[in-house]
Image (spheres, rainbow, N blue to C red):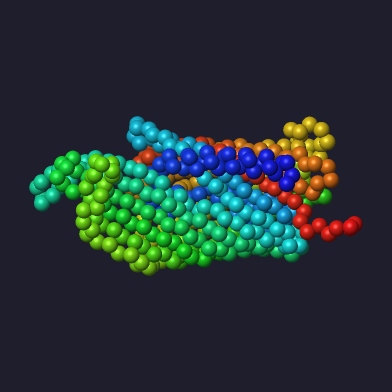
Amino acid sequence: MHWTKVSILCLLGSFFLLANKAIAQDNSPYSRYGLGDLHNNQNTVNRGMGGVSQAYSDPQSVNFINPASYSSLLLTTFDVGVEGGARSINDKGSKFSSGFGTLSYLQLGIPLITNKWGLNLGLRPVTRVSYNIQESGNGTFFDTLRVPLTSKYEGSGGLYQLYAGTGVRFGHFSVGVNLGYLFGNIENNTRLTFPDPTMYASHRMFRTTYNSFFYKVGVQYRAKLKSDMDLTFGASGSLKQNMNARQEILNETVQFDASSNNYVTQDTVKYTKGDRGTVVFPQEFGAGIMLRKFDKWMIGVDFNSSQWENYKNFGNKDSLQNSWKLAVGGQFVPNATALSGYWNRVAYRLGGYYGKDYLQLQGVNMPTLGFTVGAGLPVRRMPYSNQYSMINLAFEVAHRGNNETVLKENIYRISLGFTLSDKWFIKRKYE
C-alpha cells in the first residue's frame, strides 16, 4: 500500500476514536423532536463552501447530494469523512456545552465509462438523537395533593442510509438517481421520580425501528462559456415518502436500588411490541448554479427546501415546519499546475448560509445561519504512480435560534475528509 494511504488511514483512525469518545458526551435538546437532529449531509469539500453542492461536480470527488454529478468521475475514488466539534446552548442565561463526533460518510465512486457514466456506493448517517434533560416541579394528584417531582427525559439513536447511485451524461446534460435502504432506531425515555422514597417512580419508553427504501433524483446542465470557463445548473430532490416502522412501548413503575445505583422494575403496567405503522418523510428539493474557471476558481449559489409540515410519525404530527436554506460559497486555487510551492496547489474555500430551521417550538420560527472555511490539501504522490489523494478540511461556525426562541444554540464543527483516487483495472502492456 502506498505510504500516503497508510498515513491517511492512521489519521482517520485516530480522529474516529476521538469522535467516538465525543459522541457519548453529546446533549442536544432539539434532537427530541421529529427524527432528531438532521445530519450535515454534504461532502467535506462542499462544507468548506457553505454547503454549495447542487451544481458541483468534480472528476476526483463524489458529490452524493446530486447523483447526476457521478457522470464526471474519472478515477475510482474512495471517499470518507468524519467530523467532531462542540455545541453550546443558552437557556435564558444558563449555558451548557457538550461535544460530539461521528462518521460523516463512507463511499466508493467508480467510473463505468470515463466522464460519461459513474456509479457510487455509500453509507451515511441521516439523523442523530442524543439528549438528557432534567426539570423539577410540582405534580397534582387526587385533584388537591401537590407533590414535588423530577422529570428526566433521555433519547438516543438515529437513522442511516445505505445507498447505490448512478449518473449518466448526454452531451451537456446529466441525470442521476440514488436508491437505497434507510434503517435505524430511536429510543425516547421519560422517568418521573419523587423525593419520598416510599413512592415508586414511573418510567415510559418508546422505541421506534425504521426500515424502508428511499430514492433521490438529480439533474445537471453544463454550458461552456469559454475554452476554460463553464456555467453549471443543478437540481435534485424527492417526493414525500412513506417509511415502514415498528414501535415498542413500555410503561412501568420503578424503584431506585442503591446497591446497583440504578432503577429496577417493580411492576410492568403496559408493554406492546411489534406495532407496525408508517412515518411520512417530507418532500425535498434543491437547486443551484455554479460558475467555474478550470483549475482556478469556482463560485456557486444553492437553495434547498423541505416540506416538514407533512411529517407524521404513526399518524402523529410534531413541532415541525417547512424549512429552507440559501447558501453561497466558492473555491480558489493559486496555481494548480505549479511544480514548486506546495501552497500554490492548495484549494482555499469559503462560504456561508442562512435559512429557517425545520423546528417550530411554541409557534416561534427558528433562524439558522453559518459561516465556513475550508481547504483541499493535495497529497504528494510517488513517481509513476496513478494515485491521486486529497485531504479536505472544513471548519463551520453555526447558530440556531434567537432571543424569541426557547433555546439558542452555537455549533463549532470540524470536518475531515479523505479522498483516495486511483486508476483500477489497468491492462498490462508487458509481461
Q: Residue at x 58, y 50 (%)?
A: 105
- Horizontally, residue 184 falls left or right of residue 151, namely right
Residue 349 vs residue 189, the one in the foreground: 189
User: Front-most of 322 and 122?
Assistant: 122
The answer to which of 230 and 42 lies nearer the viewer is 42
What percent of the width, then of the height, locates residue 198? 14, 45
Give the answer, above or below, for where 78 lies relative to 390.
below
Task: Determine if residue 19 is in view.
Answer: yes
**Who is closer to the viewer here, 8 or 48?**
8
- Residue 263 at what x, y percent from top left? 26, 47
Which quarter of the figure has residue 238? Answer: bottom right
Tell me the quadrant of the picture where the C terminus can be found.
Answer: bottom right
Any part of residue 291 in sight: no
- Relative to residue 187, is residue 221 drawn left or right? right
- Position of residue 229 relative to residue 68, above or below, is above
| Residue 211 x, y percent position in the rendering | 47, 64
The image position of residue 134, as x and y in percent, is 30, 41
Counting labels gives: 0
Please name the residue shown 81% across and 57% down the image.
426
- The residue at the far right in this view is 430
Q: Residue at x 70, y 48 (%)?
A: 420
Write down the quadrant of residue 247 in the picture. bottom left
